[in-house]
Image (cartoon, rainbow, N blue to C red):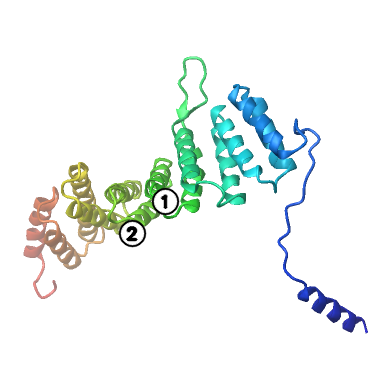
Amino acid sequence: MAVLLCMTATVAEASRPYEEAERPLRRWRLLRPAQDNPESQLEHAQDLRAQGRLRRAQRQFRALTRYWPNSDEAPLAQLGYARTLSERGRATRAFEAYEKLLEEYAGLFPHTQVLDQMYTLAEEVMERRRARFLFFPGFHAPERALPLFERIAEFGPRWERTPKAKLLIAQIKEENNKLEEAVFAYDRVQARYPRTPFAEEAAFGKGRALYTLAQRYPRDVDGIETAAYTLAFFVQSFPDSPEADTAVEYVRTLQNQLAKIAYEKARYYDRTARQPAAAIITYERFLERFPESEWSDRARRRLEKLRQKVDPADA
């Protein structure tokens, strides 16, 4: 019997027409509106902002959205709240207010205009100096802007400034030594926006980050080769780039690293392991790949001596 009643209740519930539930009204003791209706409240908040009484205007815009979140005035109040925070220099909080506008009132205002405001705030956070004290100018903390640019890219995947935002994401990660993440972020910019001016910057940024990793791990042959290939491909793809000469120098340094590793391998078989036959083969391979390195002449001389000592049949 209990099962039958449960099934009946479920069927009855399912047969009800769908109705979109409005957000419940919430009352805030410490955040009361000055007026008793949303129309008058919006006008009051806007007057306060026009008078330059920004802190009070901020509170009254916020009070409207809290007390009448489903009213026609709520989106305008949320927009006014975000703009007032921005005017007060509260960049991060203003950005969060614009986020709420996009999330809760989508379609009720020009989307790109809000994204423009958010982008400006993200740049402000990126450039702002932190910990100013007396004559100490403070220091940049661009990583604080990283989640802001990431949110902009989420809200505007096809927006015209999103490629730049994604490039800045990669650059901030590189600057903060998150090099593997930076390489991946640069690669996505290249793949997603190949015909934009940002593709060239991303290509060099990827190569630069890989080069830095190669210096950090100087025995990682795969990493060094990947960096050299990426930078060589950049020079081939963008020969007129102002960074082309730097990329060429990076490639030379990487090739030198590879040559040193290869020479040391031959020296190991020669001097440490004392396996002349293996040393001959390794020296030959080294000279075939790096005929003009700083170790090549030494390798040729040593190879000649080894060949004189070792029976060709044994080699």
Q: Picture coordinates of residue 246 (x, y %)?
A: 21, 42
What residue is rendered at 41% in x and 46% in y? 165
What residue is rendered at 63% in x and 27% in y? 47
Q: Name the residue beneath numbered marker 1.
A: 159
The kind of residue on which mark 2 rests is Ala
The kind of residue on which mark 1 rests is Trp
**45 sits to left or right of 221:** right
How many residues crowd mark 1 within 10 Å: few (<14), some (14–19), many (20+)? some
Q: Name the residue beneath numbered marker 2.
A: 191
Front position in the image: 97 or 42? 42
Name the quarter where the C terminus is drawn.
bottom left
Kindly state the secondary structure of the residue where label 2 is placed: helix
- In the rendered view, tell whether residue 133 sits above or below residue 143: above
- In the rendered view, tell whether residue 215 sits above or below residue 309: above
Q: Picture coordinates of residue 204 (x, y %)?
A: 27, 48
Sequence-earlier tag: 2 or 1 = 1
Q: Picture coordinates of residue 224 (x, y %)?
A: 28, 54
Front position in the image: 146 or 63? 63
